[in-house]
Image: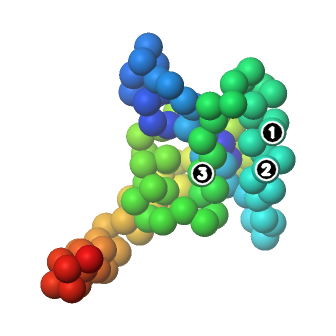
Amino acid sequence: MITVFGSVVDRPETARDIDIAVAPQHGSKLDVLAVLDELAALTGSDDVDLLDLGRAGAVAREQALVYAEPLYESVGGEYAREQIRATMERMDTAWMRKADLELMAESGE
């Protein structure tokens, strides 16, 4: 699955880069450098930011799926399922992020 997200979707006229999210095929690892090379060749720009959905945190994953435009899905309905999953994961883990922020505030970090 591949999505485009961020400023290129929200404000294309002022976007300075292209944010692309890629989910590796089930059971495989994403070759980030190879994908970046391909994206640079396809877009004609080195201003491409790549997010590996298989390694992304809950908040980044949700941003890259819910506030995005799908470019490719290998199985019909995959994008919609992953959007729901990302939102649920972000909601389910919100308490942990809040606790981390409180601990950092207490320790003065």
Question: In the rendered structure, which disc, 3 or 2, sits on the residue that comes first in sequence?
Answer: 2
10 Å neighbourhood of mark 2: few (<14), some, or many (≥20)? few
Q: Is the C-beta separation of discs 1 and 2 under 8 Å?
A: yes
Q: Is the C-beta separation of discs 3 and 1 under 8 Å?
A: no
Front residue of this view, candidates 38 and 95: 38
SS label for mark 2: helix
Front residue of this view, candidates 53 and 76: 53
Q: Is the C-beta separation of discs 3 and 2 under 8 Å?
A: no
Query: Which of the 4 image quadrants contains residue 104?
Result: bottom left
Point out which mark residue 37 bears: 1
In front: label 3 or label 2? 2
In front: label 3 or label 1? 1
Point out which mark residue 82 bears: none
| Quadrant occupied by the C terminus | bottom left
Picture coordinates of residue 28, whole percent (x, y): 80, 66
* Residue 88 placement, left or right of 74: left
* Residue 23 placement, left or right of 83: right
Disc 3 from disc 2: Cα separation: 12 Å
Front residue of this view, candidates 70 and 103: 103
Question: In the rendered structure, which disc, 3 or 1, sits on the residue that comes first in sequence?
Answer: 1
Is residue 22 depicted above or below 5 in this figure? below
Picture coordinates of residue 37, whole percent (x, y): 81, 39
SS label for mark 1: helix
Picture coordinates of residue 92, whole percent (x, y): 33, 74
Question: What residue is pinned by disc 2?
Answer: 33
Q: Amino acid at mark 2?
A: Leu
Q: Amino acid at mark 1?
A: Asp
